[in-house]
Amino acid sequence: MSEKLKIAIQKSGRLHDNSIRLLKECGLSFDNGNDQLKIEATNFPLEIMFLRNSDIPQYVEDGVTDIAIIGQNLLVEKDKGIEEILKLGFAKCRLSIAVPKLVKYTGPSWLDGKKLATSYPNTLKKYLDRNNIKAEIHEISGSVEIAPNIGLAEGICDLVSSGSTLFRNRLKEVEVILDSEACLAARHGLNEKKNALLDKLVFRMKSVLASKNNKYVLLNAPNNKLEKIKKIIPGIKSPTIMPLAEKGWSSVHSVINENAFWEIIDQLKENGAQGILIIPIEKMIV
Ligand code: AMP
């Protein structure tokens, strides 16, 4: 029987839909409609297991699965023999310390001698040790944000994305101790065949992620501005430049990064670019 790579993804919850979408965008065919715990891709040697988020690092460490899509927060907290391979750009959040809104927070030393509730005791302990703070850690598994209101703790350490849960519970975020997003993680010591399959999957994921972060741009520019425009949109190797039917003008094609999108468009306009078209890229092989 030929070797298969086994991947764990979240059974239900925040990471589930994006994990499935990413695997499908990587060209993998599978039917995930029947609530099964384990399915196989029909066009790639990959077995997909749907597991409880917090159990995933243990399953990977034990070799039940080889790789996983999980939050970096969990990877750091569980600190198992698995390593981050690729950041995936979704489920962005931060692990933060928050205290009641009315507290006069003076800096990390305020935490000295306080009781902090969290589901992330290991990550919090490392932060406290690094900063020489002696605080009591009270581990709870859920609804951490209510702890100060019911007198269980004087502060919390929990995941925050929009901050609305903190706001609703009259808490304020005072220290960010970890920035997190979903990542692909793998067990150490995969055999050669599994490593080769992992390389293939990572290559596909990188192409999908690069296409999301980049746009194809076409524009018309006066020839005397081409040198400047080439510097603004250098593209992957260099832009394509073709003469227009109208004398003294060229068409320029290139790729631009989503992060600096509007700044680049402004610079192009300042340099005489006209008729700018932006087109999504489906896959980008770099
Ligand atoms: P779930 O089990 O559905 O609550 O998903 C938890 C995972 O989603 C965490 O381990 C994080 O990686 C990620 N996440 C992103 N934003 C948040 C947030 N505001 N609160 C909790 N988890 C978050």
Image: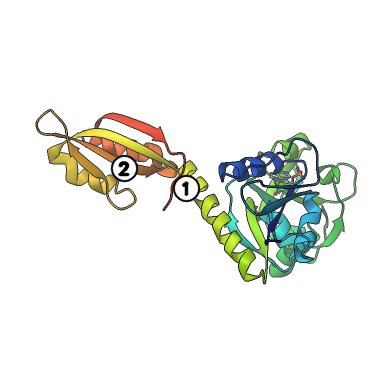
Report whether residue 180 is seen.
no
The N terminus appears in which quarter of the rendering? bottom right
Residue 60: image x %, image y %?
75, 61
Question: Can you identify the residue that label 2 sits on?
Answer: 254
Name which residue lies at 66% across and 62% down: 186
Name which residue lies at 78% across and 56% down: 120
Judged from the image, the quadrant occupied by ligand 1 is top right
In the displayed structure, 74 sits above or below 261; it is below
Residue 270: image x %, image y %?
24, 35
Question: Can you identify the residue that label 1 sits on?
Answer: 210
Name which residue lies at 81% across and 46% down: 37
The amino acid beneath tag 1 is Ala
Question: Of the residues under marks 1 and 2, which one precedes in the sequence?
Answer: 1
Name which residue lies at 87% across and 57% down: 138
In the displayed structure, 252 sits above or below 196; it is above
Residue 275: image x %, image y %?
27, 27
In this image, 111 relative to 206: left or right?
Answer: right
Q: Residues within 10 Å of mark 2 (few under 14, many from 20)?
A: many
Q: Which SS class for mark 1?
A: helix
Q: Which SS class for mark 2?
A: strand
In the displayed structure, 256 sits above or below 187; it is above
